[in-house]
Image (spheres, grey):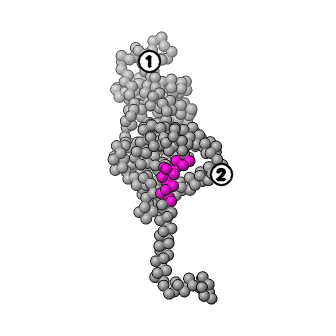
Amino acid sequence: MGKGGIISSVIDFVQQKPLFTLIIIVVVLGGFVYLNIEVLHFTTNHRFCAKCHSRNEPGPLGEVFTWSKNIHSLNNVACLDCHGSPGFFYYLKAKLQILKYTFNFASRGQEHMLKILHKAFNDPIYASKVVSMESCLFCHTDYYNQKIRKERLMTFFGITFRTLDTVKNPNYRLSKNMIDIMTDQVRRNPDIDPKHPSHIKAGIHCSFCHRRVAHGGQLFDLASENIYKREEVCSSCHIKNKETIQMSDLWLSKKEHPAKFSHTFHVQMFDCNTCHPSLFKMKAGTSEITFDTHRTDHYCFSCHGENKSANFNCKTCHKGR
């Protein structure tokens, strides 16, 4: 080695062959970066997630199985596309969060993991912390997609790590035949108007209505269970919070003397599901009230009418605008 030892030999080598030394440093650093990028890609793959989420049935630990049956899987929307906000740095943040979950699983066992998964499965407030609302809006709206893309770094020197960060609307949305939830009418049940803009503006997380949307074990998991059958999800939330949720009054016609319906007055006496959906569908304008229906048990006239419990005086409702 010589009198100076290893360090002296390295210094002599660098001094004698500086260009070759620089090449070695660049190759080593490049290999290190490449190796780390490959590790990030590997640990983002659903096969890696399946090592812990290993059950082939719906429910806790079956998240990869249910995802594989869903439309998100068919469109290459993988775990971290939903469980991390858009943008490269938010991707890294999500990876660190998963590292924390992995450490807890290794140190505290499967029982702890099941407890967390059960909570995410059944508690919408906790679910809102597990799934990024920004990810939903990034793919399903044009406005938030364009806004977020302007504000964040989406790639690392041109390298993308997940499908989410490649999404550019409206092109991506139109290519997948998706509606813009901020501007377009829902298609699968046009009798329901979910009022996405007002709910989003109020800060209501998507998971409050769309819990298990990729983990119900079906191709299309729409909103939460039964919302498109009996609208129980809508009514249960509005009933529970009827003191703080202000429903606007409705004019039931555009004619000269339209009837005015006051939500404020009625919710003081009745729950929302007294009228919805048995008497009125949840979307305004879908109930056609005519003069002939005044003598029936439909719509308002299940309560208002001759020999019925509520007032049947025309001026009570037909006040004009």
Give percent across and percent down for residue 250.
Answer: 43, 30
Q: Which residue is mark 2?
A: 107
Mark 2 lies on a secondary structure that is helix
Give percent across and percent down for residue 212.
Answer: 50, 39
Vertical relation: 7 (above or below) 172? below
Mark 1 lies on a secondary structure that is helix
Vertical relation: 87 (above or below) 141? below
Residue that sits furthest to the bottom in the current view: 3
In contact (CB < 8 Å): disc 1 and disc 2: no
**Residue 70 in view, yes or no:** yes
Closer to the camera, 242 or 2?
2
Q: Is residue 283 magenta?
A: no
- Residue stretch in magenta: 39-52
Closer to the camera, 51 or 97?
51
Residue that sits furthest to the top in the current view: 307
Give percent across and percent down for residue 66.
Answer: 48, 40
Which numbered circle lies on residue 301? 1
Vertical relation: 309 (above or below) 99? above
Q: Residue at x 47, y 32 (%)?
A: 227
Q: CA distance from mark 1 to mark 2?
A: 63 Å
Q: Is residue 307 found left or right of 108 in the rendered image?
A: left
Quarter of the picture holding the N terminus = bottom right
Q: Residues within 10 Å of mark 1 (few under 14, many from 20)?
A: many
